[in-house]
Amino acid sequence: MFIVRGRAGGTELTGTVYERGERSPSFRGAPDEDAAYVWICDEFYEVDSGGSVQVIDGREVHLAFESPMPRGFDTREQALEAAREHVRTQFARIGVDREAVELEVEREP
């Protein structure tokens, strides 16, 4: 299992890449068990009001969350690259420059 974490604007987003043999979350829309690697992480976007409030770069941002969209991959490299891109995209959706996102990947024992 790999933890992929992005930090920017005073907050962070963390997702998980599960490897074959590890038990990834199972729910409607999850990849089948044949996927060698499964990436899962929250997806969100900014709304005018309501939602969950986060302070990003000193401003209050209202976030609405979408159902997590797990994705299956054949190789570790594909899964980790997709995970990095996903994290950058989530920050960009709330007005944070993609290049400002500090990424960290750590392998969990």
Image (cartoon, rainbow, N blue to C red):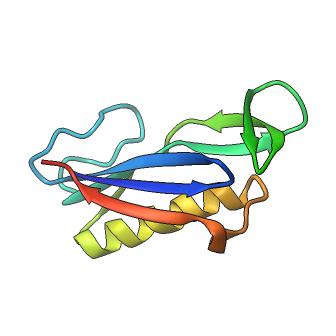
**Farthest top residue in view:** 50
Name the spot of residue 49 as percent of width and height, x first.
Answer: 88, 29
Q: Quadrant of residue 44?
A: top right
Q: Is residue 60 left or right of residue 63?
A: right
Name the spot of residue 36 as percent of width and height, x first.
Answer: 19, 60
Q: Is residue 63 left or right of residue 34?
A: right
**Residue sitting at 14 percent across and 44 percent down?**
22
- When the figure is inspected, residue 94 is found, relative to residue 99, above or below; the finding is above
Q: Quadrant of residue 46?
A: top right
**Residue sitting at 36 percent across and 31 percent down?**
27
**Residue sitting at 19 percent across and 49 percent down?**
108
Q: Quadrant of residue 90?
A: bottom right
Name the spot of residue 10 as percent of width and height, x first.
Answer: 65, 48
Name the spot of residue 101 as percent of width and height, x first.
Answer: 59, 65
**Residue sitting at 44 percent across and 54 percent down?**
5
- When the figure is inspected, residue 19 is found, relative to residue 74, above or below; the finding is above
> How many discs mark residues in the rendered view?
0
Q: Is residue 104 left or right of residue 10?
A: left
Q: Is residue 40 left or right of residue 87?
A: left
**Farthest left residue in view:** 21
- When the figure is inspected, residue 75 is found, relative to residue 11, above or below; the finding is below
The residue lying toward the viewer, choosing from 31 and 18, is 18
